[in-house]
Amino acid sequence: DLYGLGARRIGLLGLPPIGCVPSQRTIGGGKNRDCYEAENQLAIAYNAKLSGVIDSLKAVDTLPDT
């Protein structure tokens, strides 16, 4: 695991509104190439789950030196 290899600080990144990326606007944005809202909703759901995982990791008090 990362901790066993010496990692003490790990960065986690959420997703931006991926439905507004040019390729996604072309694929799902329709005639006006609007942001593809379905993709944005997936990013929002991912970020919410990631936030929950981060909170649960913060609550774990089993790692020394944290």
Image (cartoon, grey):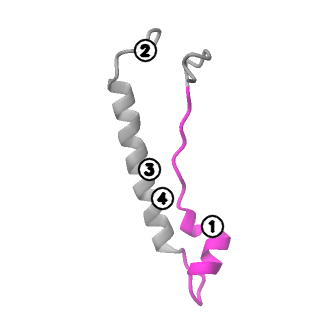
Q: Please state if 24 lies on the left or on the right of 40 as rendered.
A: right
Q: Quadrant of the N terminus?
A: top right
Q: Which sits in the foreground, 3 or 23?
A: 3
Amino acid type shown at disc 2: Leu
Magenta stretch?
10-35
Query: Measured from the top left, where is residue 32 in percent x and y?
Result: 59, 87
- Spatial CA distance of label 3 from label 1 is 17 Å
Mark in front: 2 vs 3: 2
Q: Which sits in the foreground, 27 or 35?
A: 27
On the image, numbered disc 3 is attached to which residue? Answer: 47
**Disc 3 + disc 4, Cβ < 8 Å:** yes
- Spatial CA distance of label 2 from label 1 is 39 Å
- Spatial CA distance of label 3 from label 4 is 6 Å
Q: Earlier in the sequence, mark 3 or mark 1?
A: 1
- Spatial CA distance of label 1 from label 4 is 12 Å
On the image, numbered disc 4 is attached to which residue? Answer: 43
Label for residue 21?
A: 1
Query: Measured from the top left, where is residue 56 in percent x and y?
Result: 34, 32
Amino acid type shown at disc 3: Asn
Q: Earlier in the sequence, mark 2 or mark 1?
A: 1
